[in-house]
Amino acid sequence: MRRGGSARASETRSGWLFVSPVIIVLGLFLVAPIVIAFWVSVSDWNGRGSPLSSGVSFVGADNYRQLLTEDSLTRSDFATSLRNNFYYVLIVVPIQTVLALALALLLNQRRLKGLSFFRTSYYFPSVTSSVAIASVFLFLFAGGGSVNALLGIFGIDGPQWFADPRGVLHIMLGWVGIGGGADGAGPAALTSRDFLGLTWWDWLSGPSVAMLTIIALVIWVSAGGYMLLFLAGLQNISADVYEAASIDGASRWRTMRSITIPLLRPTLFTVLTLGLIGTWQVFDQVYIMSKGNPGKTTLTPAFLSYDQSINNGQWGSGTAMSFVLFGIIIVFTAIQSLVLRDRDASTRGFFGRLRSQPIAAPPQHPTSTTGPTT
Amino acid sequence: MSQTTLTDRHVGAPDPETPKAAPRPHATRTAILKALGYSALTVFALLYLFPFIIQIGTSFKTDSDATANPLNPIPSNFTTAAYQQLFQQDFGLWFTNSVVVALFVTAGRVFFDSLAGYALARLRFRGRGAVTLAIVVTLAVPGVVLLIPKFLIIKQLGMYDTYSGMILPLVADAAGVFIMKNFFESIPVSLEEAAKLDGAGVFRTFWSVVLPVAKPALITITIIAFQSSWNELPHFLVSRASPETNTLTTGVAGLLTGALGAGNRYPLKLAAAVLMTIPVALMFFVFQKRIISGSLEGAVKE
C-alpha cells in the first residue's frame, strides 16, 4: 500500500528511518559529548567513576575562574599555550595562503603543459597521514638531520631544532639591544608586569626555534590543499575578462593586480578563514613531535587540554580549556561570516564554507564553468 | 555531476592559439616566460618530493648511514633490516587494526551517509528541515574541541578500548551526508517515479534504482572515508589505550616519541612511515582526479 493516502505516511516513516543512523551517531558522539563535557567543566569531577554519578557536584564557573584569574601553574601553562598558538597562527596563516596562491598561479599558466604532475606533487602531502609526515620532519630537522646538513653546505651551523626553546623574537630583540637576548633576562619594565600569569616579556617571545619546525611542516602540508581552492577560484574567472584586458593592452602584471587578485577575493577569504580555524586547532603535530617541549614552547591549547585531562586528571580545567578554545574558534568563524556577509556561512561549517564559496565570475556568466544546474 | 578535472579546463585563460602570428621578439619572450614557469614549478616540486625521496631512501639504510649522510637518499649499504625489525614489533597488528577500522568506517559511512542524503534530498517528511539544519550545525563544531568529550562518552558507554568505541563514532559524518544529498538533488526524479509506479518500496527504489546511478558520488565518499579513517590519530588516542588496539597512527606515533632503546633508529621510523603511506598513496594515484574534485566538492560546482 504505497500509493494514495498511505504514500505520505510511508515516506515519513522511511524518511526518519533513513536519517536515524546518522542522527544517532552524531547525537551520541557529537552532541552528547559536548553536553557531558560542559557539565564536567562546571563540576568538581576528579576522573574517578562516572561524571554523572551523584557524588559529583556543581561548582559553577569555578574551573573557568581558576583557569583565567587565579595565579596557578595551570593558568600560566594555558597562557603559554595561547601565546604559542597565537604566534603559530600569525606565521602559518599568511605564509600558507601566499604559498598556496603562488602555487595555484604557477599551475594556472596557459602556456605550460604537463601540469598535473606538479599539481599531484604539491597536493600529495595533504592526503598523507600526519604521523608519516611528522616522522619525515623529525628526521629532516634532527640535530644531525638533512636541514642542518644543507645549512652546513653554506657554512651555517644549524640549531638543535627540537631542543631549542629560545623565542625567535627574543633573539631578534637581543640583536637590537633589548633584553639580554634569548637566554638573558628581559628589561625590567616588561618583566615586572604580567597578564594571565605570564610576564609581558614572555608574551613577546615569538615562536620558539622548536615551534618553527612545526610551522614549517604545517605550511608545507596545507599549502597544497589551499592551492586547490585557489585553482578552482582561478578557473572560475571568465575568459572574457582576460580577453577584454588583453584588448585594452594590459600587461601581465597589471592583469594580475587589477583582475585576477580582486576576482579571487572570495576564495582568499575562504582560505584565510579556514586557515584561522584550522591553525587554532593544531594538535597532531604537537602530540607526535614535541608533546609541548622544549620548555613548554610548543604547547597549544588543544594539546594542553588533552594532556591536562587525560594525563593529569585535571578534568575540570581541561574541559574548561576546550570550551575557551571553542570560544576562540567561534569568534574567528563569526568574524569570517561578518566579513563574507554570507548569510549561510555561519551555520554551514567547514564543507559548507567550501560549498558556499561564491563564484568569482561576473554575474552574466554564473554557470559558465560549473557542473549540473539543479 | 561533471567530473571535469582542473587541468583540461583552463577556462580562466585566454585562448592559447591567439598569439600565433606574433612577431619574433614576442616569441622569445614567451619562451623565456615558459622556461621561468617550469623552473619555478620544478623548484617547488623538489621541495615537495625531496622529503619523500629521503624518507624512502633512508628507510633502506643502516642506522649509522642514516645519521652520517642525512642529505643523500641513496643508501651506501642497501638493507631491509628496518622493515624486518618493524614486523618483529607489533607493526602487523597495527596494520591489521587500521585495515579493520578503515573498512568498517568506510562501509558505514557509504551506507549511512547515502541513506540520510537520499532522505534529505528526496523524501518529504515532517521535520526534514530541522534535521538538515541540525546536521549542518554539527559541521561547525571544531573537531579538536571534541577530544575530551568523546573520551568521556565512550567511557560512559562502556566502549572504551574496544573496536566498537573506535569504529562507531566515525561511521557517519555530516560532510558525507551533504555530498550525497547534493548529488541526489542533481539527478532526475523520473527514474524513481518509474520504479514507484512499478510498486517498488522506498528502500527498494533507493537500493536498486538510485544507488547504482550514484556511483561517482559513492566513490568520492569511499575515498574520503577511507583516507580520513586511515589517517585518523586523535580519535584513537581518546577511544582506546591498550597495545592490542593500536592502529598504525597511534602505534607509529608511539614509535616516534617512545624510547626504543639505543640510537635514533631513523630507518625504522621512516620505514613505518613509508608502509603506512602506501595504501593511501595507491588510492591517491588511482583516483587522483576524483580526490581532487571531491575535495573541492562544491567549490567547483555550485
Image: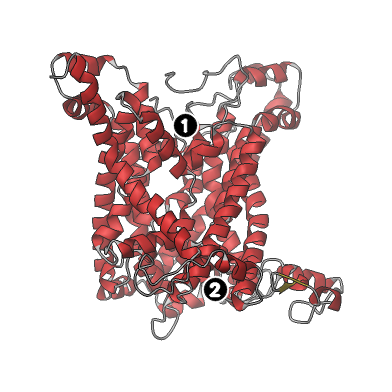
User: Residue A121's spot in the image, x, y percent?
Assistant: 48, 47
Q: In this view, does B173 lie to the left or right of B88?
A: right
Q: Mark 1 lies on which chain?
A: B
* The image quarter in which residue A1 lies: top left
B161 vs A136, nearest the viewer = B161
To which residue does mark 2 refer?
A: A142
Which of the labelled discs sits on residue B298, or is there none?
Answer: 1
Q: Which of marks 1 and 2 is in front?
A: 1
Residue at the (13%, 17%) spot, across then down: B199
* x then y, percent, for residue A275: 58, 48
Q: Is residue A100 visible to the viewer in this orientation of the structure?
A: no
Label of residue A204 in the image: none
For label 1, the SS is loop
Q: What residue type is labelled 2?
A: Ala
Mark 1–mark 2 Cα distance, whole angstroms, equals 41 Å
Vertical relation: A142 (above or below) B147: below
The chain ID associated with circle 2 is A
At 60% from the left and 54% from the top, the residue drawn is A328
Amino acid type, residue under disc 1 in the picture: Gly
* Residue A208 % position (x, y): 66, 70
- Work out whether residue B258 can be spotted: yes
Answer with the quarter of the image where residue A204 lies. bottom right
* Picture layout, residue A370 above or below residue A166: above
